[in-house]
Image (cartoon, rainbow, N blue to C red):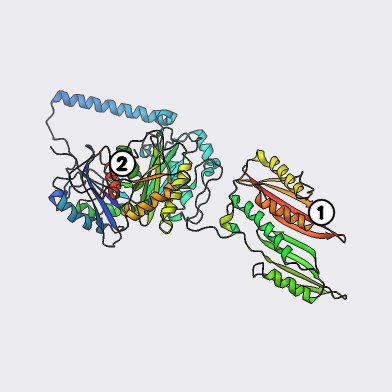
């Protein structure tokens, strides 16, 4: 029986994390981490040339769609509260807020907004934006011909929260996901009503202690939340880093338990090597947008 | 589930399937229903439905033009249709809000080096309005101007104590002050009289060792009895920014209790303040500033003790100016200008 297969690609500075998933069955076929040999992935021709050989050797069936998760550091992610006084024109507000708060032309950016708890009377909105040039490069003839033009382009933080919801489930209490790469770290809190908060760390500040501090700071807003954090990203493969951050988080005034995200409870995995799962959850999360 | 997609929708038929692409990469494409000959009866019913739709559309357009977008449809109609029909989803209330600039309450700052920050609590912290390339956490504020208002009060309290303490320790016997002034953040000015040039040099050497190197010394005059009048100005050593205890802006309702607490602290250190009952309140754009202009005849050691107690306390008052002059032969009179920042 043929199933819809989606190729999820999570882009980072110097590698691609890929996942072949049947999102409708929540079945993960294959994951991998593909180095880009030092080439910046903002050159999308690299993206296609890295993916082509891998997909040829790994895909036996047809894939139906490609979903790409781009790193928060390559775009603009904003979680904004909507003024209570507003009764409509929310998209206008998002555009207005974007231009005033970032000093960037909204027209230069491909923007998307998701309203919470609902679009009719939203209380907050998550806006993601990425330069139109990059978006159009993903739609270029070259990428189209290679068959890797994505049907969905989503921020990694959104993809992570989606996969977290799909695998662990989200209730009324906020839960936290931490993605730590060499050059960027981000912690996301969300519950059943949607994303609640972000904390970011730029590359020069990344250390186990600094990350533990942003976790502590974030959890201060949610004193009743269970202080468990799922760790993913490139640094989750670094055993020393994981040990250090686990130690730092435990030594906090109110200790936080940090665990590598190396299992997806509501997903089935095909036989094979899934040791890099914690690095590839963003790619798996991206495929949920194909469903 | 965050439903987000930044890929613009593509015209039908161009999806995935591309000539020349490897077989394994080809998508299924979009199914377009196969053409089947329709019977006459079926054709006429389709035509009827089409006409009904046209009538319905005209009626809907007329309704929207006359009465505007009804409340239950706001947020659901595509923006293109709204623009095409020249409508607006904005209600009268939100239009007033927008024109009045109320939405500006959500953020402050419009440049890349001036990231958005909350002003009055109507929005969440900066962490919720993140833009990575302007989020410069590794750049710690290193001077007073870069400090948030909430950091300036503890800064002033420490700086005021450092200034008094510096001059207390640097002043040898044989030096008398005609003016001794401190101005926030860390500027000082002193006009002093030295008994002789040796005392003058001792004083200056001791002072130079304790203040920043930007010291300016001017010998104003020498009196016929050999006294030397000199002026010094410059900046004292800055307080340690890391040790500053952050102090949130207080609520306006707490201003009176803060004034009482300040008075109590002063009395406990033998400093009797006059003028504390007449605070000057200024409503600035985003915060409220309360200034207390007081005077006291307390002696220098008492003032020093008071400054030390003030910097250790949680009082929300800082000192933005201090000027001390002799009054008579033995006494001195000091004017101290306290400042407090409160929310609107």
- Residue at 26% x, 43% y: name it: A287
Looking at the rendered structure, the secondary structure element under dot 2 is: helix
Image quarter (top left, top right, bottom left or bottom right) of the C terminus of chain A: top left
Residue at numbered disc 1: B297
Question: Is A59 in front, or is B162?
Answer: B162
What is the total number of numbered labels drawn onto the structure image? Answer: 2
Q: Position of residue B321 (x, y in %)?
A: 71, 56
Q: Residue at x 29, y 44 (%)?
A: A285
Give the residue pinned by disc 2: A163
B121 and A219: which one is in front? A219
Residue at x-position 49% and y-position 42%: B124
Q: Quadrant of the N terminus of chain A?
A: top left
**Residue at the image point whose x is 75% and y is 50% from the top:** B269
Point out residue A188 in the picture as x, y percentages from the top left corner: 40, 44
Q: What chain letter is assigned to the residue under label 2?
A: A
For this view, does B126 lie left or right of residue B304?
Answer: left
Residue B146 in view in this figure: no
- Can residue A279 be seen at all in this image of the molecule? yes
**Inter-mark Cα distance, 1 to 2:** 69 Å
Q: Residues within 10 Å of mark 1 (few under 14, many from 20)?
A: many
């Amino acid at each position: 029986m043929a199933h819809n297969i989606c190729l999820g690609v999570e882009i980072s500075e110097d590698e691609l994390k890929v996942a072949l998933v049947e999102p409708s069955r929540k079945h993960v076929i294959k994951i991998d981490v593909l180095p880009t040999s030092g080439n910046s992935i903002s050159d999308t021709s690299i993206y296609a040339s890295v993916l082509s050989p891998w997909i040829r050797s790994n895909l036996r069936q047809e894939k139906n769609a490609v979903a790409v998760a781009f790193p928060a550091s390559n775009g603009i992610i904003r979680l904004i509260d909507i003024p209570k006084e507003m009764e409509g024109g929310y998209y206008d507000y998002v555009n207005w807020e974007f231009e005033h708060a970032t000093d960037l032309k909204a027209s230069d950016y491909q923007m998307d907004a998701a309203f919470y708890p609902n679009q009719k009377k939203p209380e907050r909105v998550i806006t993601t934006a990425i330069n139109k040039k990059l978006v159009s490069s993903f739609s270029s003839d070259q990428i189209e011909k290679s068959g890797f033009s994505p049907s969905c382009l989503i921020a990694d933080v959104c993809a992570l929260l989606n996969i977290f919801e799909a695998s662990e489930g989200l209730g009324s209490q906020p839960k936290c996901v931490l993605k730590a790469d060499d050059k960027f770290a981000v912690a996301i809190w969300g519950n059943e009503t949607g994303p609640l908060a972000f904390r970011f760390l730029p590359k020069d500040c990344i250390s186990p202690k600094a990350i533990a501090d942003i976790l502590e700071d974030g959890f201060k807003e949610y004193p009743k939340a269970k202080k468990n954090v799922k760790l993913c990203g490139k640094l989750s493969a670094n055993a020393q880093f994981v040990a250090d951050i686990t130690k730092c988080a435990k030594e906090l005034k109110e200790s936080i338990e940090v665990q590598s995200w190396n299992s997806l409870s509501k997903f089935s995995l095909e036989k094979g090597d899934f040791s890099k799962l914690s690095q590839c959850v963003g790619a798996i999360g991206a495929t949920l947008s194909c469903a | 589930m965050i439903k987000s997609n930044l890929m613009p929708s593509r015209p039908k038929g161009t999806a995935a399937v591309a000539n020349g692409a490897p077989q394994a990469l080809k998508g299924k494409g979009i199914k377009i229903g196969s053409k089947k000959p329709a019977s006459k009866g079926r054709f006429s019913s389709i035509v009827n439905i089409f006409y009904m739709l046209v009538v319905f559309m005209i009626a809907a357009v007329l309704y929207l033009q006359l009465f505007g977008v009804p409340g239950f449809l706001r947020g659901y109609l595509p923006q293109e249709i709204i623009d095409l029909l020249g409508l607006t989803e904005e209600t009268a209330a939100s239009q007033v809000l927008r024109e009045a600039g109320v939405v500006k309450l959500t953020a402050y700052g419009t440049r890349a080096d001036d990231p958005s920050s909350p002003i009055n609590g109507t929005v969440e912290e900066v962490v919720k309005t993140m833009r990575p390339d302007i989020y410069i956490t590794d750049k710690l504020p290193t001077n007073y101007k870069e400090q948030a208002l909430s950091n300036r009060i503890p800064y002033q309290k420490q700086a005021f104590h450092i200034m008094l303490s510096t001059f207390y320790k640097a002043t040898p016997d044989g030096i008398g002050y005609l003016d001794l002034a401190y101005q926030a953040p860390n500027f000082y000015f002193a006009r002093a009289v030295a008994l002789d040039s040796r005392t003058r040099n001792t004083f200056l050497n001791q002072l130079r060792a304790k203040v920043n190197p930007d010291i300016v010394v001017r010998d104003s005059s020498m009196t016929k009895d050999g006294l030397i009048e000199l002026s010094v100005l410059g900046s004292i050593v800055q307080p340690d920014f890391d040790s500053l205890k952050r102090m949130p802006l207080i609520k306006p309702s707490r201003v009176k209790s803060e004034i009482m607490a300040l008075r109590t602290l002063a009395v406990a250190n033998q400093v009797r303040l006059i003028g504390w009952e007449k605070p000057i309140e200024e409503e600035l754009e985003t915060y409220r500033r309360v200034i207390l202009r007081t005077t006291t005849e307390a002696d220098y050691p008492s003032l020093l003790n008071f400054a030390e107690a003030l910097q250790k306390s949680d009082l929300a008052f800082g000192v933005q100016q201090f000027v001390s002059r002799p009054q008579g032969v033995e006494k001195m009179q000091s004017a101290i200008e306290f400042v407090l920042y409160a929310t609107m």
